[in-house]
């Protein structure tokens, strides 16, 4: 059976680095982890085995449009129906579009990413394309579909009483047969009555729900003007989502609301700054105990490389902690945002950590590289100095998604 000997393994949900005499797997399951003593420093290079990474907020549909939104506002680039993204995606044929999505997934595997939660536009057609691409690459796609077109006119949304039209109900039924769940862009895209219908339909189908909240102040203020409540409280009360995205403008009361709700949140610091938005309150959310995940957001904005996102997030959190809090943040807490924290959101076989009997879903990192092999703080090095070039192999449930030609360790 395949194995890697004399390596370092991040063991368990807390991601504790241990020397490991042998890490092995049989078919799709880890069957050997012969752990030695904990290892926080390295004197000499080694191979490092880490859980496969999860990117918890992507829009792979716009991978055909890299940097197409440069110089555009959030509304100009991304809002339906006239935003740049929607206009340009409508011009692509299915074969070309599917090819771009698959290419983005292969790049993700090249960086150690085994799965992602995708907020997929273009209705049933869009979800089908992503499902087909995922079948060819082996990358785990949790697909959250969206209506192809907005079901309501602005005046209907302002009245906030209408139910879903029959056409939207029919589309939702078909969509949930393909996708893993549902997510419109914001709470302001549907009426309160329609959101209750969405919750009922997804619950009956055993599907997931997610929503973008507080990406800019307008999300909150528009919701308040229409309904008397901000978008975050409406999301929690009406939709009860599995995942809430962004929280860039969350204040202290909203952070407490998130913590009390026990709903997972996914942060996207690089995408926020690329759009000229403030960064999310990473340290306040960590201190409040929110289960935090990380995402790279639209491929049109950022390549789906979680090592770059980890580096940026750690440094932002360190700045938010302040000079007096030299030990904050714990780099392992940042790494858990793309590994073991996924279990608190997805559950099932999405463990996000390594232990005997769990799925053989991991990445092998080359810590024999000169700039990595002599670290005095292994976990900090892991979240701040890694690049795609240091990933030697990526496996999901025992299947190779990526392997460097030079890697022959097993």
Image (cartoon, rainbow, N blue to C red):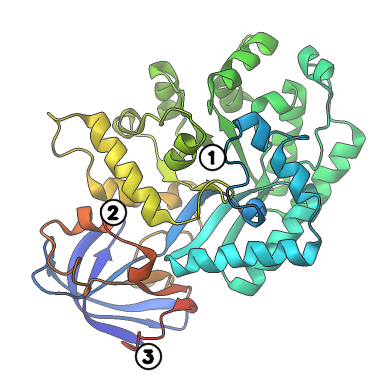
Where does residue 331 sit, x and y in percent of width and height?
24, 48
Q: Is 394 on the left-hand or right-hand side of 146?
A: left
Q: Which mark is residue 68?
A: none
For disc 2, the marked residue is: 383
Badge 2 crowding class, 10 Å Cα cut-off, few under 14, some 14 to 19, many 20 or more, is many
Marks 3 and 1, the one that precedes in the sequence: 3
CA neighbours of label 1 inside 10 A, class few (<14), some (14 to 19), many (20+): many
Please tell me in which quadrant of the rendered image residue 189 appears.
top right
Q: Secondary structure at mark 1?
A: strand
* Image quadrant where one finds the N terminus: bottom left
Q: Which percent across, then down, holds residue 18?
A: 18, 67
The residue tagged 3 is 1
User: Distance of mark 2 from mark 1, alpha carbons?
Assistant: 24 Å
Cβ atoms at labels 3 and 1 below 8 Å apart? no
Which residue does the image show at 71% across and 40% down from the upper left?
A: 84
- Helix, strand or loop status at disc 3: loop
Q: Give the mark nearest the N terminus, 2 or 1.
A: 1
Label 2, label 3: how far apart the Cα atoms are: 31 Å
CA distance for labels 3 and 1: 38 Å
The structure residue drawn at horizontal position 83% and vertical position 18%, both measured from the top left corner, is 156
Q: Measured along the vertical axis of the image, is residue 344 above or below residue 81?
A: below
Give the mark count.
Answer: 3
């Amino acid at each position: 059976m395949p194995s890697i000997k004399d390596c370092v393994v991040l063991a368990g949900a807390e991601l504790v680095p241990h020397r490991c005499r042998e890490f092995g797997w049989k078919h799709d399951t880890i069957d050997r982890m012969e752990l030695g003593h904990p290892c926080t420093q390295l004197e000499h290079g080694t191979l490092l085995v880490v859980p496969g990474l999860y990117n918890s907020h992507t829009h792979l549909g716009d991978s055909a449009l890299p940097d197409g939104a440069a110089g555009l506002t959030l509304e100009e680039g991304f809002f339906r129906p006239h935003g740049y993204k929607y206009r340009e995606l409508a011009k692509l044929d299915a074969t070309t579009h599917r090819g771009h999505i698959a290419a983005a997934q292969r790049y993700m595997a090249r960086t150690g990413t085994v799965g992602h939660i995708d907020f997929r536009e273009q209705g049933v057609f869009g979800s089908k394309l992503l499902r087909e691409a995922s079948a060819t690459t082996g990358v785990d796609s949790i697909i959250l579909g969206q209506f192809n077109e907005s079901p309501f006119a602005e005046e209907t949304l302002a009245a906030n009483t209408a139910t879903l039209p029959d056409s939207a109900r029919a589309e939702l039924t078909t969509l949930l047969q393909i996708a893993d769940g549902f997510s419109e862009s914001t709470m302001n895209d549907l009426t309160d009555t329609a959101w209750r219908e969405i919750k009922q339909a997804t619950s009956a189908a055993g599907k997931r729900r997610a929503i973008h909240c507080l990406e800019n102040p307008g999300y909150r203020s528009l919701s308040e003007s229409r309904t008397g409540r901000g978008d975050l409280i409406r999301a929690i009360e009406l939709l009860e989502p599995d995942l809430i995205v962004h929280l860039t403008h969350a204040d202290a009361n909203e952070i407490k609301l998130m913590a009390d709700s026990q709903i997972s949140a996914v942060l996207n610091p690089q995408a926020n700054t690329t759009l000229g938005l403030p960064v999310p309150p990473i340290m306040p959310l960590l201190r409040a105990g929110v289960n935090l995940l990380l995402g790279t957001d639209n491929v049109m904005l950022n390549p789906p490389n979680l090592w770059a996102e980890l580096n940026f997030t750690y440094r932002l959190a360190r700045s938010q902690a302040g000079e007096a809090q030299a030990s904050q943040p714990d780099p392992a807490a940042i790494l858990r945002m793309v590994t073991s924290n996924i279990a608190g959101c997805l559950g099932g076989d999405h463990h996000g950590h390594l232990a005997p009997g769990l799925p053989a879903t991991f990445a092998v990192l080359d810590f024999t590289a000169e700039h990595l092999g002599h670290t005095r703080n292994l976990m900090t090095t892991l979240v701040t100095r890694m690049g795609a070039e240091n990933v030697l192999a990526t496996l999901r449930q025992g299947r190779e998604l990526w392997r460097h030609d030079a890697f022959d360790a097993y």
